[in-house]
Image (cartoon, grey):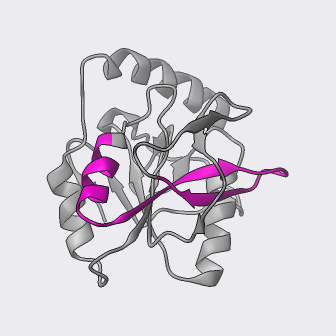
Amino acid sequence: MLKKNIRKKIIKIRSQKYKKGLIISLKKINKILLSHKKKKIIIGGYYPSNYEIDCLKILKILQNKGHKISLPVIKNKSQMDFYEYNNNDPLMVNKFGILEPKPNNLVFPDIIFVPMVAFDKSKSRLGYGGGYYDRYIDKINKKKKCLTLGLAFSFQEVNKVPIDKFDKKLDIILTELNILL
């Protein structure tokens, strides 16, 4: 199946299922964070759109536990960076209609929560086609090792995600039902 066909199918299902209130367990995320070597870490989240898994409550809880939270800011030429974000900070709307923080304090996350349209058992991810996360994962892994944690609903799993040489596999994919390691 072509990437665009998978995107269309999964986004339609996600918009229908999301309304039923499926959520990711904070206990599963805590288990992953506890396995990280640092006690206080920088977490790269995202502002959910288009019925993506909402990680904002999780980020707030993690920030209250002393972790530094960041959100992506879209740059020119299909690039993005992560900037520190606090729950009360004002957000701006980017060119895709997604909220992002003011680009004041650049950070390099230890863990990135990655949204997705679809995934497969090999931890390949299908996004919206812009390549922002693939480019960022490539860039940050040249600076330091960053754990990529994909957040999705279990129904977003497909048999095989079509990939090309630029696509990056994730380290872990977390759904409301299981954890792919």
Q: Is residue 71 magenta?
A: yes
Residue in front for this viewpoint, 39 or 174: 39
Residue in front for this viewpoint, 117 or 38: 38
Q: Measured along the vertical axis of the image, is residue 21 above or below residue 3?
A: above
- Quadrant of image for the C terminus: bottom left
Residue 50 location in percent, x, y? 51, 25
Q: Measured along the vertical axis of the image, is residue 144 above or below residue 180?
A: below
Q: Residue at x 55, y 71 (%)?
A: 108
Specify start and end residues of the magenta stretch as a single range.
57-85
Residue 4 location in percent, x, y? 66, 31
Residue 55 seen in the figure: no
Q: Is residue 2 magenta?
A: no
Residue in front for this viewpoint, 32 or 6: 32
Picture quadrant where residue 36 is located: bottom left
User: Which residue of the protein is positioned furthest toward the left in this rendering?
Assistant: 27
Residue 91 seen in the figure: yes
Q: Measured along the vertical axis of the image, is residue 3 above or below residue 59?
A: above
Is 88 situated left or right of 132 in this image? left
Is 8 situated left or right of 63 in this image? right
User: Which residue of the protein is positioned furthest toward the right in this rendering?
Assistant: 77
Q: Residue at x 34, y 50 (%)?
A: 59
Residue 151 location in percent, x, y? 38, 47
